[in-house]
């Protein structure tokens, strides 16, 4: 997945100017969230993608959900590339890229749904690569600041999808709960059935509910994609 582009069934993600490339866990978040939204009785007419990077998540949602999507990206090079990816896609007329700091974004417009694959690590060794550290580490956006930004942009009945490392998710959930968010659905992700969980996707809402818990293994014991992974990613991956 270190190539300069990643081709999906209905769109292509060019990524040579982005610090964070297309990765399996982000694809899982996009597919899981799109599936969640597509199965709902009500649609999400306005979606916000915080920290868009290559634009992958916006494109995955646009493929399955008929919504206007606003993607926000701080890094200038990544923002320009995401905008190009949107324009080249079948849904360029309803995905808008804005390059800015989400902490300074105006909040007159509220969104029905927010998706974010935020900087993962609040306290860990950094690589020394400024662009990558900004994308991977909470050097510019802490979990508290992210939750505050979500609170400013989300409609009262809105929901948010977040992808984080399994070990960091509990910390985020505690902070989210303190801000009035309830965990509605979660997906715990393993590399294979022989591994422990390494990523978590959580869908939060301000409306209390019983949490629905899901698990997904990417590979089986023979390093073959599991049937659950194939079913989830089949709308996107070329060879599934």
Image (cartoon, rainbow, N blue to C red):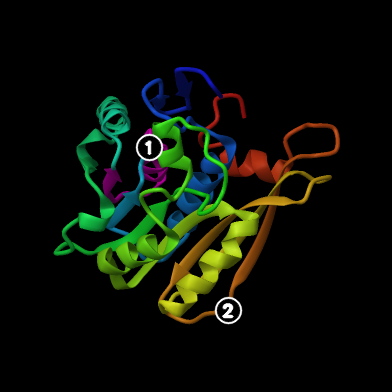
Q: Earlier in the sequence, mark 1 or mark 2?
A: 1
The quadrant of the picture occupied by the N terminus is top right
Q: Residues within 10 Å of mark 1 (few under 14, many from 20)?
A: many
Q: At numbered mark 1, what does the secondary structure look like: helix, strand or loop?
A: loop
How far apart are the alpha carbons under marks 1 and 2?
A: 32 Å
- Residue of label 2: 210
Q: Position of residue 162 (x, y in %)?
A: 48, 56
Q: At numbered mark 2, what does the secondary structure look like: helix, strand or loop?
A: loop
Q: Residue at x 28, y 24 (%)?
A: 88
In front: mark 1 or mark 2?
1
Nearer to us in this view, 71 or 228:
71
Q: Dividing the picture into quarters, in which one does residue 147 lie?
A: bottom left
Q: Residue at x 48, y 42 (%)?
A: 136
Q: Is residue 167 left or right of residue 152?
A: right
Q: Is residue 117 visible?
A: no
Nearer to us in this view, 42 or 141:
141
Q: Dividing the picture into quarters, in which one does residue 152 lie?
A: bottom left
Q: Residue furthest top?
A: 4
Q: Residue furthest bottom?
A: 208
Q: Residue at x 48, y 30 (%)?
A: 21
- The circle drawn on residue 215 is none
Q: Position of residue 39 (x, y in %)?
A: 48, 59
The quadrant of the picture occupied by the C terminus is top right
Give the answer, above or below, for where 239 lies relative to 185: above
Q: Is residue 108 left or right of residue 64?
A: left
Give the answer, above or below, for where 79 lies relative to 57: above
Q: Residue at x 36, y 23 (%)?
A: 17
The stretch of residues the image draws in magenta is: 54-73
Determine if the magenta segment contains residue 154: no
- Residue of label 1: 53
Nearer to us in this view, 238 or 86:
86
Q: Position of residue 107 (x, y in %)?
A: 18, 63
């Amino acid at each position: 997945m270190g190539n300069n582009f990643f081709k999906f069934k209905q769109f292509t993600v060019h990524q040579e100017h982005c610090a964070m490339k297309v990765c399996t866990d982000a694809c899982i978040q996009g597919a899981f969230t799109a599936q969640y939204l597509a199965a709902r009785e009500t649609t999400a007419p306005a979606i916000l993608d915080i920290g868009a990077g290559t634009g992958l998540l916006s494109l995955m949602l646009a493929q399955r959900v008929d919504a206007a999507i606003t993607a926000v990206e701080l890094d200038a090079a990544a923002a320009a590339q995401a905008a190009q990816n949107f324009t080249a896609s079948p849904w360029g007329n309803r995905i808008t890229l804005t390059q800015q700091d989400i902490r300074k974004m105006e909040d007159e417009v509220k969104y029905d749904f927010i998706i974010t694959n935020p900087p993962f690590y609040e306290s860990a060794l950094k690589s020394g690569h400024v662009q990558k550290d900004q994308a991977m580490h909470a050097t510019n956006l802490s979990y508290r600041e992210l939750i505050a930004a979500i609170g400013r942009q989300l409609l009262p009945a809105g929901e948010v999808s977040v992808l984080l490392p399994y070990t960091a998710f509990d910390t985020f959930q505690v902070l989210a709960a303190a801000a009035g968010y309830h965990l509605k659905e979660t997906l715990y992700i393993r590399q294979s059935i022989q591994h422990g969980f390494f990523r978590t996707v959580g869908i939060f809402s301000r409306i209390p509910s019983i949490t629905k818990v899901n698990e997904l293994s990417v590979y089986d014991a023979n390093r073959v994609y599991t049937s659950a992974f194939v079913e989830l990613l089949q709308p996107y991956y070329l060879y599934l």
